Image (tube, rainbow, N blue to C red):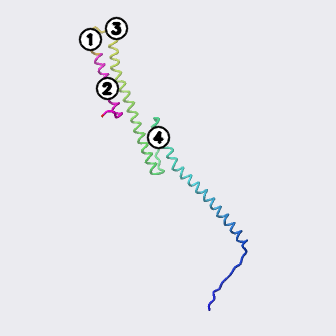
Amino acid sequence: IVRSSQVIYIASANMFRGITGVINLVLLGIMVVTAIVASVTAAGVASGISRPISRLSLHAKQLGSGGFAVLPADDSSLETAELTKSINDMSDRLRKYDQAQKDFLQNASHELRTPLMSIGGYAEGLVTGVFADSKATAAIICEESRRMNTLVEELLTLSRIENGSLD
């Protein structure tokens, strides 16, 4: 018969309690360090995601109040880079629209001022007796009034087109 060799070791349970306590403390320390590292990493990632979005949100609010500044390119992610480009494009279009509207108002006020000055001048001339032929002067006043009425109608038509109330 072949017998295998065996070793039997007998030890006190008190010795293992001490080792178990040390192992538990080491594992608890590792768990605390891992939780701290995970929290710091998560905070960094969250900040990296939210910072560009917060900046874009602030810029959108500035656009709403008439500030047409261009944002610098943001390459932190493909999505934020695309959103930044879209907001910059929108800002540029709004700036151009705002300038076109200001130019239009300047031109419209100039075009309306001309017939008003003409009407006022001829009417004053009639009142003071400068013009001998009042019929010809009244005809000029009527023509300038029609011209001004046509300009106002064109402005109203443009307004209706812009508001979408005109087919």
Query: Residue 156 in magenta?
Result: yes
Neighbourhood count class around disc 4 (C-alpha, 10 Å): few under 14, some 14–19, many 20 upward: some
Q: What residue type is labelled 2?
A: Glu
Q: Which amino acid does label 4 sit on?
A: Ala
CA distance separating discs 3 and 1: 15 Å
* Residue beneath disc 1: 135
CA distance separating discs 1 and 4: 60 Å
* Residue beneath disc 3: 128
Looking at the rendered image, the disc whose residue lies closer to the viewer, 3 or 1, is: 1
**Residue 110 place in picture, x, y as percent:** 36, 24
Looking at marks 3 and 1 on the same chain, the residue that comes earlier in the sequence is marked by 3
Neighbourhood count class around disc 1 (C-alpha, 10 Å): few under 14, some 14–19, many 20 upward: few
Q: In which quarter of the image is the C terminus?
A: top left
CA distance separating discs 3 and 2: 32 Å
The image shows residue 40, relative to residue 156, as above or below, that is below
CA distance separating discs 3 and 4: 58 Å
* Label 2 residue SS: helix
1 or 153: nearer the viewer: 1
* Label 4 residue SS: helix
**Residue 86 place in picture, x, y as percent:** 42, 44
Looking at marks 3 and 2 on the same chain, the residue that comes earlier in the sequence is marked by 3
* Residue beneath disc 4: 60
Rendered image quadrant of residue 5: bottom right
* Residue beneath disc 2: 153
CA distance separating discs 4 and 2: 36 Å
Q: In this view, does 24 lie to the left or right of 61?
A: right
Q: Tell me, yes or no, whether the two marked residues, 3 and 1, touch with CB atoms within 8 Å.
A: no
Q: Which amino acid does label 3 sit on?
A: Thr
Q: What stretch is highlighted in magenta?
A: 141-166
* Label 1 residue SS: helix
Rendered image quadrant of residue 116: top left
